[in-house]
Image (cartoon, rainbow, N blue to C red):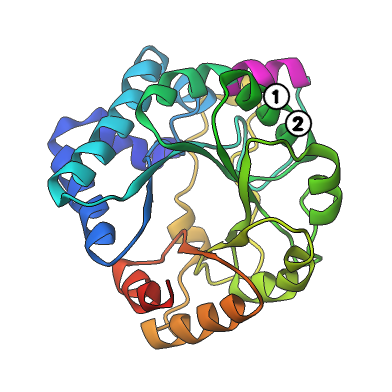
Amino acid sequence: KGTLWSTSAILDDKFHQLLIDVHRSFINAGADVIVTNNFSSRKIRLIQNKVEKKFKYVNKKACELAIKARDISKNNTLVAGSLPPQNGTYVVDDRDIKIIKKDFMEQAQIIKPYVDFFYLDVITSAKEIEAACEVIEKLNMPVLVGLHLKKNGKIASGETVSEIVKKYKTNNWIGLIGACVSLEIIERSANEMSNLNIPFGFKANLWNIEEPLPVHKFNRSKFNEVGKNPNDTMGKREEITNEVFYKFAKKIKEKGASILGGCCNINPGHIKSISSLK
């Protein structure tokens, strides 16, 4: 539904059981961690879709549904709280850092009581890393940092992974991953990450293009834009079967990766195929 994406399923309670079932399908496939379904529940998207009054509700409910799925499964699965880019996706947030920090803080404070750690979910610029890490330090929570890497192995604002770690790493970091990136980009980045003395890995996407298109770089004067579904604009790599994904994950694990997972278009079958790599 416009730029609400899967937040639509939180706003309509008839889909809550579906969300629980989806979480459980990944838990049953062997996932050690599930991520709260609030990637598109950032305030700017709710404002754009005229449901900003639901900001606290959708973020809290995303956590509650994840916890319910975990509890039903009677599993020790961890719940990671999604802290997504606070403006557009796959693009640099060029707003004042104080505004970015305020947005991160508002979302983080809502989900903190429910999650085991924060997951910086597909972050694209150094400014966002700086803002989010300051917020997380104040809240004294562990964080898994997910960087969205381009074909050149850098984030959209131009920094390498090594530069980000050197400048922004805090004691709260529990790991670093390439987030929502293609298998090819992950493989090219693995050697650099393996030299950073920090647990590393990936959440792979299966978009049909190696570098996702910038989507929803918001303009406050254009909140009437409908927004496109990325599943329609970027497609899916049908050739990445469970077996292909297993062989890929095994190769990255042999390079030292200890965090193996999936993002857009990855299904429980893919996760089940790599669960034996624990």
Give residue 206's position: percent from left, percent from top: 49, 69
Is disc 2 in contact with disc 1, using a CB cutoff of under 8 Å?
A: yes
Is residue 93 something one can see in this rendering?
Answer: no
The kind of secondary structure the magenta stretch mainly shows is helix
Numbered badge on residue 130: 2
Name the amino acid type tagged 1: Glu
For the point 86% across and 49% down, the residue is 163
Residue 127 falls left or right of residue 173: right
In terms of secondary structure, where does tag 2 sit? helix
Is residue 144 something one can see in this rendering?
Answer: yes
Q: Nearer the viewer, residue 253 or 177?
A: 253
Give residue 80's position: percent from left, percent from top: 43, 42
Residue 187 falls left or right of residue 216: right
Q: Residue furthest top?
A: 53
Residue 124 occupies quadrant: top right
In terms of secondary structure, where does tag 1 sit? helix
**In the depicted structure, whether residue 206 falls above or below residue 162:** below
Task: Give the number of callouts.
Answer: 2
Alpha-carbon neighbours of circle 2 within 10 Å: few (<14), some, or many (≥20)? some
For the point 74% across and 58% down, the residue is 197
Q: Which residue is mark 1?
A: 134
Q: Which quadrant holds the C terminus?
A: bottom left
Residue 59 falls left or right of residue 170: left
**In the depicted structure, whether residue 179 falls above or below residue 62:** below
Q: Nearer the viewer, residue 50 or 102?
A: 102
Give residue 220's position: percent from left, percent from top: 63, 21
Which contiguous range is marked in magenta? Answer: 97-104
Name the amino acid type tagged 2: Glu
